[in-house]
Image: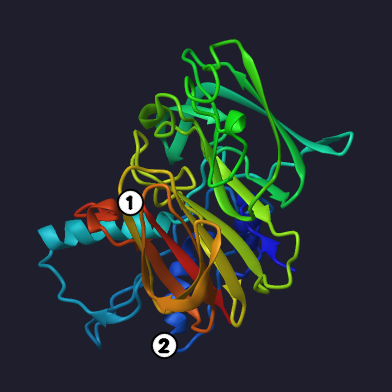
Amino acid sequence: MSKIMSHADDTLATLAEAPTSRRTFLRTASLSAVGGALVACGKDGGQSGAQAQKPAAAVPVRPESGQTGGTMGAHDTVKPAPGALSAADAMDAMHEKGIKAFPAKTAVYGNQPFEPKIVNGVKVFEITASEMQWETAPGQMVKAMAYNGQVPGPQIRVREGDRVRVVLKNQLTQSTAIHFHGCELQNDMDGVPFITQPPVKPGQSFTYEFTVPNAGSHMYHSHHNAATQVGLGLLGAFIVEPRNKAQEPKVDQDVVFILNDGAHGYTFNGKSFPATLPIVAKLGQKVRIRYMNEGMMIHPMHLHGMHQTVIAKDGWPVPAPWKCDTLNIAPGERWDVIVNCTNPGTWAFHCHILPHAESEHGMFGMVTALVVQK
């Protein structure tokens, strides 16, 4: 059975179970490529792995070889003169600081699994839209609009043919609505104010009820003042499992990546590097990744070390799966891929529009990692 890995605590707990510090798994993984097994992270003296760890000790310069270790393993280094710190050294230090912090803990994570209430056979999801402060990276607080206090909103998973009721309560200071993007619903449930329904004003509620149609990776989001509201966090995954799963790929993990580039900057699932969560898999496992672009820009997603096999576009299976290492995700698109984790190590995984991922100060924004453990 597929294992859903969208819950942040599950991922951080996975990182906390292995034998070394959580913040040093990148260094350990890199060194494993030249002679050691990958170790993801570790014990913390009785505290959970999601809590802050002490930075790893720096790997000392080896005078006999003129090499240093560090996050990326042994490499030739020219030592600066005593007391001098070059511009290159200063830049390197900023880059290394970010890598050592990853994955950095933040207070709340979005995209949490949403368990419905069952009322007379109907799956009922109660969603409250409200304004709050959201932590995109440690100490970086931003204004947000959120569904049920999280960005992205809770992850809804239903089955083709289910009867679903979504009750939207508006606690914002402006009107809103919900559009189920990709679902081929009846017209009055499409969620576009003044076209299919009146706007849901502050303090009001609106109920969407429908029989779930086409299966696939879909989204739900505001369709009112959307550049602002979606950019501030009114978005989430709406995943419809097929009634007949015979043609579904067998995978070990099922991961959702919601991309956004609004007022919160460049984010994966509401977080910016180093607060993005890595995917942690065992050697030989298969991971399904569902990309969803809720932003206003294209984001070519690039995985190092292994290819991606594309299996679906906008919820529909592609006629013939095809392979790539970089997949362009345009606004509104959903792409499903399978990654066969055949190459052990810690692999960079990022948007390949470079200003969305890296600057002279180091990596930021749309960067995470795939950790393949032996």
In whole angstroms, how far apart are the C-alphas of marks 2 and 1? 27 Å
> Which of the 4 image quadrants contains residue 255?
bottom right
Kind of residue sitting beneath label 1: Phe
Identify the residue at horizontal 56%, vertical 33% (top origin). Answer: 190
Residue count near mark 2 (Cα–Cα under 10 Å), binned few <14, some 14–19, many ≥20: few
Instruction: Please tell me which residue lies in front, 86 or 286.
Output: 286
Q: Position of residue 313 (x, y in %)?
A: 48, 62
Q: Which mark is residue 76?
A: none
Kind of residue sitting beneath label 2: Val
Q: From this viewpoint, which residue is outermost toward the front?
A: 187
**Residue matched to label 1:** 364
Q: Closer to the observer: label 2 or label 1? A: 1
Q: Would you place residue 260 above or below residue 291 in this image?
A: above
Task: Assign the C terminus to one quadrant of the image.
Answer: bottom right
Left or right of 276, for residue 6: right
Q: From this viewpoint, which residue is outermost toward the right?
A: 120
Identify the residue at horizontal 45%, vertical 64% (top origin). Answer: 369
Q: Which mark is residue 34?
A: 2
Identify the residue at horizontal 35%, vertical 78% (top origin). Answer: 73
Q: Earlier in the sequence, mark 2 or mark 1?
A: 2
